[in-house]
Amino acid sequence: MKKGFTLIELIMIIVILGILAAVAVPKYFDLQTSAKDAAEKGVVGGVRAGIYTYFAQNKAYPATLDSASTAACSASNVCFDTVLQQGGVISDWTKATATTYTGPAGTTYTYTAATGDFK
């Protein structure tokens, strides 16, 4: 007597694995979106805290948040290094203009030096 799986048993296993994969893949992509959003909010909170720390030390808001050029933030084009003590942000952010930034989740933020707002 030979032992083994029948063709129907193997097909059922493949169907079950397909259903599990169909459920798991969308959850994985949703986790990536949530992680980008959370990382963006963390940087925004840090920048805002850095702006107020700068104000407390200098009695004025910083004129700019960094000396980065208009481009993607990188090791050679560091964003927010004026207000973030760890040296700024080097990835996932883009500097669109002198005062406008776009985060990894796609939200655009504008810095207003007169009021210290970063919205």
Image (tube, helix red, strand yellow):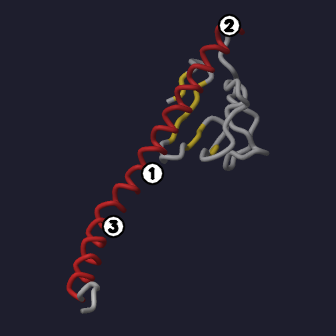
Asked whether 90 or 3 is in front, the reply is 3
- Residue kind at label 3, given as amino acid type: Ala
- Residue kind at label 2, given as amino acid type: Lys
Label located before the other in sequence (1 or 3): 3
Instruction: Quickly name the residue at label 1.
Output: 32
Instruction: Quickly name the residue at label 3.
Output: 21
Q: Are circles 1 and 2 on residues that touch, CB within 8 Å?
A: no
Distance from Cα at disc 1 to Cα at disc 3: 17 Å
Instruction: Quickly name the residue at label 2.
Output: 59
Label located before the other in sequence (3 or 2): 3
Of badges 1 and 2, nearer the viewer stands 1
- Residue kind at label 1, given as amino acid type: Gln
Q: Horizontally, is 102 left or right of 25 in the view?
A: right
At a point 62% along the width and 23% down the height, the residue shown is 113
Q: Horizontally, is 67 left or right of 65 in the view?
A: right
Of badges 3 and 2, nearer the viewer stands 3
